[in-house]
Image: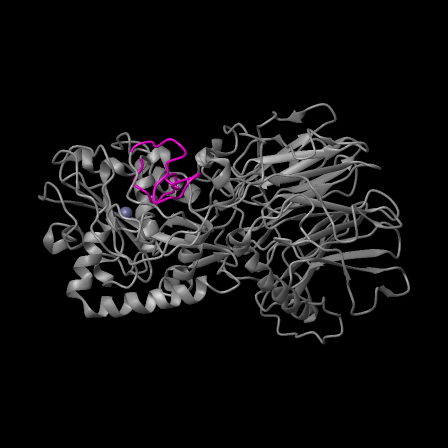
């Protein structure tokens, strides 16, 4: 296992990373202004089943050859289609027959993909891949010249679907829920055009062509369409009138740049304007972008046979496409009892029936983004989970927990005179953790450790001063399907509050009162929201909890428990503004006092505080603290009106600034370079993190039950 570093490295004093100066303050990241997103993002969703029950994964899909014919078209000439038809395989076969370089590229890409997705460690993006999009509106009738609102509604859908933040992910049958995966991909309308000029990411052109087909004419100005923007800098999406019942089509990676991208008929684009049921939930673009990122149809494109494959291991073998709104279970190819994964975006069902990508599909898309589509990823937003946590339950006492290479949890401690069990040694406390453990201490010689298991359930163990319970390497299973690591707060002896995102990304909560877990050992209270970050939890007093999350619009949201009820509502949230690129960090140094830190999309650190009566600088505004941060900040308060904040700069060195009650030092936006000590820490942690990733693959080798994180 990787050991934590020691502070004996000499600092590197090339202050590359951070300085008070920083480049132009383009204020892209944060402002008091409300972001473009729908501000209701957090509010509406009422929590679904707190029934986050663990369940085994489905079987493997069959192997076989890709190919065969897809289903034919349907629907009237230019009427809104009534069932899904996608032209991707027509394009694929055409290119295979006409382009030797495409044939070679496809072979190379599949070899790379196979190599990356069959390693013990599935590929996983270290941050969030952000992809710039240009939408080319090619219209014949004014109605086809779709509105900005319709385009925005499509971007919103893509961002929800590729982050598994779509509220209807709750439709996934419980047996398939462990397969649901966050692809960690976000999309935004380009802000700079190929010539370097500002743009809204939309082109519009009137055409005399009344309807287009899958022959790519729409991608060329000379053929009545609109030329592509460079494919290594933009995801090109053409929106036009498609004919013959065609909803959309895509080009797999490896094809010509001039035709790279996806095409969607305007009645299947977005959720408003001309979007028409049953394809008015924006899922045609989700499906086509799936192809663009190298996903095949889930049934394997072999007609209705059982020999095709989508080259994804965790999707059940399936005969042909499903259409409409199937009822679970839908068995084919002997894949009972659970049957087809028809609620997957890569099937042919109606928009409101497709709600998920699987882990295996996400691994393929990730491999694609790390290889052939790598130039497209302009920004990788840094949202690392905090490293192994450390707690202190008395002066001169530290307890640190990290994940080992085997994903077990390891512990070491400082007792005031020496490290135990030894300077370089660790105590193995068992488990198979998906990410860094979370630890809390509510009294002397008391530790409570929480970790998300390979099946995403939350597991717990505790130290009572003499021994680990339930056993040295065993864990108590607290249920759930966590989409985030757990976060824990304690406001008094024998009191624990555990927060985790559920399968639908709503916040869920459970608590220990000294005698029992509520609402039950494996149950959770649903607190609403669609959360894009693990929650940050802080308690400044008895029976008081404050929880902060990043919403789907990347703004910060807050809710609090005052001892009797959740405010502003059981599932509602207070909007605190911002466009956050890190998870929030919350600390409190006094009663009714809160300090929050986030990194903006421009890499700057931002701060806001609550003094008991109001937020400063304003309810939705933020104080700029400068810097160019490459990690989630760490903040501690060791006394009244004292804050110390640590961030990592672009040179991987650690930087520090502090608040003494009257001012930030060394300056409002300046930092003190602490040098190389973190370089070493980060290296050690990176090793641990890299080795933690294979846990993603473990759904295929069985899901641990009850006591078995060990
Ligand atoms: Zn398709």
Question: In the picture shown, does residue 163 fall above or below 542?
Answer: below
- Asked which quadrant contains residue 248, the reply is top left
Towards the viewer: 484 or 334? 334
Q: Position of residue 299 (x, y in %)?
A: 32, 47
Give the residue at x 30% y 68%. 107
Residue 45, percent from left and from top = 50, 29
At x 77%, y 32%, the residue is 516
Question: Would you identify the image quadrant in which residue 320 lies?
Answer: top left
Residue 528 placement, left or right of 158:
right
Determine whether, in the image, residue 207 is placed left or right of residue 176.
left
Q: So how many labels did they put on this image?
A: 0
Is 83 placed above or below 191 here? Answer: above
Q: Report if residue 328 lies within the magenta region.
A: yes
- Identify whether 608 is placed above or below 426: above
Colour scheme employed for the rendering of this structure: one colour
- Does residue 619 appear anywhere in the picture? no
Look at the image and give the residue range highlighted in magenta.
324-349
């Amino acid at each position: 296992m990787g050991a934590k570093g020691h502070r004996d490295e000499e600092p590197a004093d090339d202050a590359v990373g951070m300085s008070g100066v920083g480049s132009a303050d383009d204020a892209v990241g944060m402002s008091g202004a409300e972001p473009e997103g729908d501000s209701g993002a957090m509010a509406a969703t009422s929590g679904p089943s707190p029934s986050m029950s663990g369940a085994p994964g489905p079987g493997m899909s069959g192997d076989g050859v890709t190919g065969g014919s897809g289903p034919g078209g349907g629907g009237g000439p230019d009427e809104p289609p009534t069932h899904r038809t996608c032209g991707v395989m027509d394009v694929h076969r055409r290119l295979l027959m006409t382009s030797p370089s495409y044939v070679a590229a496809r072979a190379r890409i599949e070899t790379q993909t196979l190599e990356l997705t069959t390693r013990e460690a599935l590929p996983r993006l270290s941050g969030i891949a952000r992809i710039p999009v240009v939408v080319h509106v090619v219209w014949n009738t004014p109605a086809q010249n779709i509105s900005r609102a319709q385009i925005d509604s499509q971007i919103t859908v893509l961002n929800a679907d590729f982050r598994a933040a779509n509220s209807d992910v709750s439709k996934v049958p419980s047996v398939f829920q462990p397969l649901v995966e966050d692809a960690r991909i976000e999309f935004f309308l380009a802000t700079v055009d190929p010539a370097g000029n500002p743009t809204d990411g939309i082109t519009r052109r009137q055409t005399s062509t009344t309807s287009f087909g899958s022959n790519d004419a729409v991608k060329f100005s000379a053929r009545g369409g609109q030329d592509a923007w460079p494919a290594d800098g933009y995801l090109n999406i053409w929106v036009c009138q498609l004919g013959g019942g065609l909803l959309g089509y895509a080009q797999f990676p490896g094809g010509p740049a001039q035709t790279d991208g996806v095409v969607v008929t305007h009645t299947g684009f977005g959720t408003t304007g001309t979007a028409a049921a049953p394809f008015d939930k924006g899922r045609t673009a989700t499906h086509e972008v799936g192809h663009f990122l190298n996903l095949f149809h889930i049934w394997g494109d072999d007609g209705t046979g059982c020999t095709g494959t989508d080259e994804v291991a965790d999707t059940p073998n399936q005969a042909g496409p499903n259409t409409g709104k199937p009822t679970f279970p839908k068995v084919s190819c002997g894949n009972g009892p659970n049957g087809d994964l028809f609620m997957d975006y890569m099937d042919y069902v109606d928009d409101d029936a497709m709600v998920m990508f699987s882990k295996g599909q996400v691994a393929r898309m990730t491999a694609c983004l790390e290889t052939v589509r790598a130039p497209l990823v302009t920004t990788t937003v840094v949202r690392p989970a905090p490293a192994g946590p450390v707690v202190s339950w008395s002066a001169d006492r530290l307890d640190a927990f990290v994940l080992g290479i085997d994903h077990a949890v390891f512990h070491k401690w400082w007792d005031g005179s020496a490290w135990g069990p030894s300077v370089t040694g660790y105590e193995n406390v068992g488990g198979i953790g998906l990410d860094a453990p979370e630890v809390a201490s509510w009294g002397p010689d008391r530790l409570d450790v929480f970790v998300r298991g390979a099946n995403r359930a939350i597991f717990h163990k505790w130290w009572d001063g003499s021994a680990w319970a339930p056993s040295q390497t065993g864990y108590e299973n607290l249920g759930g399907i966590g989409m985030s690591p757990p976060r824990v707060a304690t406001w008094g002896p024998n009191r624990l509050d555990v927060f985790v995102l559920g399968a639908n990304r709503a916040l869920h909560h459970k608590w220990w009162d000294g005698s029992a877990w509520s609402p039950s050992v494996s149950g959770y209270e649903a607190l609403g929201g669609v959360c894009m970050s693990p929650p940050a939890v802080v308690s400044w007093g008895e029976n008081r909890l404050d929880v902060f999350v990043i919403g789907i619009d990347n703004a910060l949201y807050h809710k609090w428990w005052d001892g009797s009820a959740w405010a502003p509502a059981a599932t509602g949230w207070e909007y605190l503004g911002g466009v956050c690129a890190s998870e929030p960090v919350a600390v409190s140094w006094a009663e009714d006092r809160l300090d929050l830190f986030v990194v903006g999309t421009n890499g700057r650190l931002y701060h806001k505080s609550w003094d008991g009566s109001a937020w400063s600088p304003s309810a939705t505004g933020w104080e700029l603290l400068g810097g160019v941060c490459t990690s989630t900040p760490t903040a501690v308060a060791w006394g009244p009106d004292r804050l110390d904040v640590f961030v990592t700069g672009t040179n991987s060195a650690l930087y520090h600034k502090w608040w003494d009650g009257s001012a930030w030092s060394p300056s409002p936006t300046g930092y003190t370079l602490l040098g190389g000590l973190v370089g070493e820490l980060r290296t050690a942690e990176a090793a641990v993190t890299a080795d933690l990733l294979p846990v993603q693959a473990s759904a295929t080798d069985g899901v641990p039950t009850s006591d078995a994180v060990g």
